[in-house]
Amino acid sequence: MAEHHRFTTLVLSTVAVILLCSTPQPSALKHAATTPRFFEKFAASSTHHSQLDLHYETRYFQQRLDHFSFSELPPFPQRYLINTDHWDRSSGPIFFYCGNEGDITWFAQNTGFVWEIAPQFGAMVVFPEHRYYGESVPYGSREEAYKNASTLSYLTAEQALADFSVLLIDLKQNFSAIDCPVVLFGGSYGGMLAAWMRLKYPHIAIGALASSAPILQFENIVPPETFYDIVSNDFKRESSTCFTYIKQSWDEISSKGQTNDGLEHLTKTFKQCQKLKSTDDLFGWLESAYSYLAMVNYPYPSEFLMTLPGHPIKEVCRRIDQGPAGTSILERIYEGVNVYYNYTGEAKCFELDDDPHGLSGWNWQACTEMVMPMSSSQESSMFPPYEYNYTSYLEDCIKSFGVEPRPKWITTEFGGHNILATLKKFGSNIIFSNGLLDPWSGGSVLQNISESIVSLVTKEGAHHIDLRASTGNDPDWLVEQRATEIKLIQGWISDYYRKSKAVFDI
Amino acid sequence: MAEHHRFTTLVLSTVAVILLCSTPQPSALKHAATTPRFFEKFAASSTHHSQLDLHYETRYFQQRLDHFSFSELPPFPQRYLINTDHWDRSSGPIFFYCGNEGDITWFAQNTGFVWEIAPQFGAMVVFPEHRYYGESVPYGSREEAYKNASTLSYLTAEQALADFSVLLIDLKQNFSAIDCPVVLFGGSYGGMLAAWMRLKYPHIAIGALASSAPILQFENIVPPETFYDIVSNDFKRESSTCFTYIKQSWDEISSKGQTNDGLEHLTKTFKQCQKLKSTDDLFGWLESAYSYLAMVNYPYPSEFLMTLPGHPIKEVCRRIDQGPAGTSILERIYEGVNVYYNYTGEAKCFELDDDPHGLSGWNWQACTEMVMPMSSSQESSMFPPYEYNYTSYLEDCIKSFGVEPRPKWITTEFGGHNILATLKKFGSNIIFSNGLLDPWSGGSVLQNISESIVSLVTKEGAHHIDLRASTGNDPDWLVEQRATEIKLIQGWISDYYRKSKAVFDI
């Protein structure tokens, strides 16, 4: 296998991994901040998908840009979606989704669970947007907000949590709902925010459902190979030949790329709209498909990132394995990833995802706080081997944003090491829900920590499937998982009212 | 009583209240940011006091100026005192005092308890200095750091807690002490920091002894009259005539001040070095004395703020009550406060405390986050009546610093409302210790919240007396209080090792 093929860091987006691959620049393979798959890309295309029929009002809240200093900075409008139709004003809870790295309307669409259960709880529903995403950008425009390291410098998780807290206190006051309990929800990075917010702001929210929240994907808490190993196992469990074809394909591509007209051939084989400039581009395109497939490997047809059949990896492997006799490995691979990129058959050719400016919000976050080491092991992974190297990561971030990451900051601020011991007698009311097919599950909490900081693990679940709207095709384990979540949340709320009453009675 | 006499906000300093009084400016009586009694004033004079014979090394740690953004700002050196003489390197805890608003060497001197118990715990002792105080100032000099609102803007409690966390993680790594449990200590504002740090950074510290920490002195959590009512009661319990003399004295002073040569007379009666410019100055001078006396109303002679006899308020009231027949109220008052300002009899005349620049660090904190409403009630207080008025407070802060306070921020960030219900099943291992003679006790936690978030209340205790070095004169209740604290801390440490072992055994 060609030595120069290296993985770049996985960057988490929304649902949503951003699997980064080496870039076309010949100078250096990139690690953190270039060629991400934008979540926004999917968000934009989501209008083609079937939509939930949601009713909400869109409002804006004037937020402070820096909560933790008294620097004079311009405030910015934070968008939030709100629905009070079913809210029981006397005692109904506030269901608050911790918006993550993208347009909040898209998260609202893909978090049907919260909307579905709100009526039975008499709950108000609030979906606030994360700063620097969607319409909630400072400095007047996305362009200004993303101009440079200085304007981007307030795009951090701590600031986002403070936004949520300030907004909630304001909402409670304005709705005369000071005593209404707040329950947090979040998936992926939003799940991390939900869990962290419950830990940091227990006076504001009584509990959190943190779905597919890889809060342990930092430093050396989980092995850096975890993510790619899980993706690889998702393929291997369907078919070991499929796994092997994929594992072999990288060398094939590299060899082909080194021949005369090799790139042209590859361009044709993989129906790229533009001629490939390097095999690295193709690596990235394929790696992304596999990783996203692992995340959305749902048991029923879905249209979350792309239009896909149920159990999409099964279908990918079926096509890879069952290529007609004499079909080359690369042709099989193409047939396979076609399930991901073109299940509807509408695409005539494919555009590489490109981020010419290297300035997506998540890339900034990955280059500052969200430093998640990712490697790909020679043995257990089907991806090209890659060893995480902080030095190159750092160099890349300096080059892309002129910023130096703080790889230890998240664990300093939020913890993570020895989480079992730390939270055994500290904190309460957090559900960490995970599906083991989801490659992010490996960096999440998969054990009960205490009586009320619990882990719900489903063997066949993928990326925060529990937060999605229910469907007629939901398997029993999913129905049961959601029922358990509802029961736990009900328990938090009863407990809250019991305690308040007890204090009042003193 | 003259209408224009109004209290200004109490500002907490160190031990250490900063009782603000109206200023000499005729324009407006000040509320938050002018004429504080600097803690530094006392720190400077503390060299005249008896010193503990402490052994420590002084070191400096390069700190980030803004932990919560990625703005490019110059780092600053944080000073810390460290002693590892008694540290058991295999498993000894780290005793970490959360430095508050002043020179850290002075806190080290006045926190003998930590030094005394360290050997029996095999503990390392660390006293880090709070940013912007002592030698730990950014921008190269105190002058630069305090230049304006922009340079001061990073002087916040959250940043200070992040400093402590980053420093601790670095120390643990450098001493190969990753698994050594950290126990936090703090008194007054330092106690608030200790409690908040245990709540916000449970992964870094296993518990906190928060002595005289008025974390509920914000917004309307406790009535704004609390502080002055406690001071007043401290006098009333010694003598109701003493209380009445003091209560009457303000009108006497006001009347006198309005007569010809009145200010001159007052200047002489109260042996002021400089001629009084207004009676407000004198009000401030007296109010400070009473409030500080309440704080350091220790049962044995002490030299914390000033050289004082044991039970100093008893002595003040003895002198006020027992003035020779025919002595005027004001002469009695003078004799009384002389106990505070001149117990050694060395002073020939008195200088008013002045802060011509209005730029002490605590004043900045009071004008930004630490907005503690303080009123003085017409009925129960011996002070001139004053009703807290946020509008004037705000105006004053804008005038003094060009900054707008955020009066709700501390409760948003750290909680406080409904603390019993919030922390009943959240958090662990905090001791809130308070002496009821201390006027700050009213804003602190005086009830057990849970099995391990407990309150130790002593009826005869004053401002964080438990943290002081033991003396031959310690009353039994103080000896017992400290023994209880030691036992609780031992319990946290055993529990920590039990849990770590349990996790390791899994």
Image (cartoon, coloured by chain):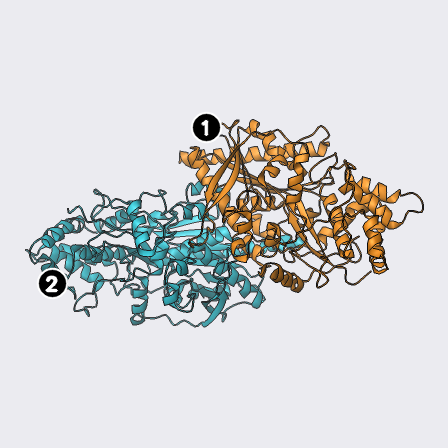
Chain colours: A orange, B cyan
Residue drawn where x is 53% and y is 55% of the image: A153
Question: In this orientation, which residue lies closer to the viewer: B229 or B488?
Answer: B229
The chain ID associated with circle 1 is A
The chain ID associated with circle 2 is B
Q: Which residue is mark 2?
A: B268
Which amino acid, mark 1? Ser
Q: Residues within 10 Å of mark 2 (few under 14, many from 20)?
A: some
Q: Which residue is mark 1?
A: A90
How far is mark 1 from mark 2, CA to CA? 64 Å
Which amino acid, mark 2? Lys
Q: Looking at the rendered structure, which numbered label has been put on residue A485?
A: none
Residue drawn where x is 11% and y is 54% of the image: B257
The x and y percentages for residue B285 are: 21, 58
The x and y percentages for residue B384 are: 20, 48
Mark 2, secondary structure of its residue: helix
In-image side of B457 versus A303 (left or right) = left
The x and y percentages for residue B213 are: 38, 52
The x and y percentages for residue A480 are: 68, 32
In-image side of B280 versus A228 (left or right) = left
Can residue A200 be seen here? The reply is no
